Amino acid sequence: MNTQLPDAVAAIIAAAIRDDPTSTPEQQAHIAVRTLREQGWHIAAPEVIAAALRAA
């Protein structure tokens, strides 16, 4: 099993919490998602992914 993806995401989330510990969990989540997007990750809801797969 390739654990690179979960490890990378976990590192971004941990950094968002560590770097801004007084933020609310929602603010930390926004920081993490923004950082992931800046690094080229694509964030999509499961139903969006399922619809794209059905259309392919």
Image (cartoon, rainbow, N blue to C red):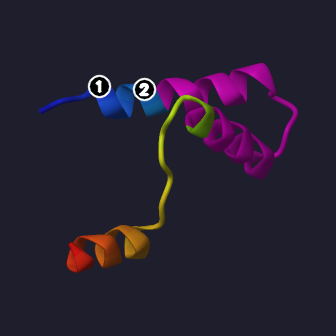
Q: Quadrant of the C terminus?
A: bottom left
Examine the rendered structure and indicate whether residue 45 appears above or below residue 4. Answer: below
Q: Which residue is at a point 80% across and 28% down the rendered structure image?
A: 21
In-front residue for pair 11/24? 11
Image quadrant of residue 37? top right
Examine the rendered structure and indicate whether residue 25 appears above or below residue 46. Answer: above
Q: Which residues are magenta?
A: 10-36
Residue at disc 2, secondary structure: helix
> What's the amino acid at mark 1?
Gln
Reply yes or no: does residue 42 show up in magenta.
Answer: no
**13 to the left or right of 3:** right
Q: Which residue is at a point 75% across and 52% down the rendered structure image?
A: 26
Image quadrant of residue 14? top right
**9 to the left or right of 38:** left
> What's the amino acid at mark 2?
Ala
Q: Which residue is at a point 42% across and 26% down the rendered structure image?
A: 8
**Which residue position holds label 2?**
8
Q: Position of residue 29 (x, y in %)?
A: 68, 45
Reply yes or no: does residue 19 show up in magenta.
Answer: yes
**Which residue position holds label 1?**
4
Q: Position of residue 7 (x, y in %)?
A: 37, 26
